Image (cartoon, rainbow, N blue to C red):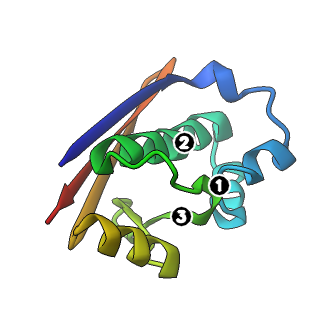
Amino acid sequence: MIGIDIEEIDRFNSWSDKEFLRIMSLKELEYAKSRKNPPEHLCGFYCVREALVKALNKNDIVFNKIETDHEKSGKPYLVENEYLKEIMKICGVKQIEISISHSKNYAVALVLARK
């Protein structure tokens, strides 16, 4: 199952930390703030969530219970916390892979969920 989402980065320029924490983890917010262009990364994390909804055809996912992290190589992945494990079990998914890309104006994420 595949899901993809693309968003305009500028959409995230004026959000407060409180607004971001409604849809993502503190660790993601801190990661983005440590980078050169935080809105680009925050937008990418948001796209992952939207793409996950599409891949799993499940629109009741609680966004701030999903967390993206990165391997040492920089490759992003979803943290398999208890919430994600339960969602995967409900949807019959054994593995989820993600990819995030950015341009000057857009961020895009792809989610591949395998049964």
Give the residue furthest to the left: 115
Between disc 3 and disc 2, whose residue precedes?
2
CA gap between label 3 and label 1 equals 7 Å
Disc 1: which residue: 24
Residue 41 lies in quadrant? top right
Residue at the spot 83% in from the left edge and 47% down from the top edge: 17
Between disc 1 and disc 2, whose residue precedes?
1
Residue 46: assigned label: 2
User: Under tag 1, what secondary structure?
Assistant: loop
Amino acid of disc 1:
Met
Q: Are marks 1 and 2 in contact (CB under 8 Å)?
A: yes
The reply, left or right, for residue 71 in relation to residue 25 is left
The reply, left or right, for residue 54 in relation to residue 7 is left
User: Under tag 2, what secondary structure?
Assistant: helix
The reply, left or right, for residue 62 in relation to residue 68 is right
Amino acid of disc 2:
Tyr
Image quadrant containing the C terminus: bottom left
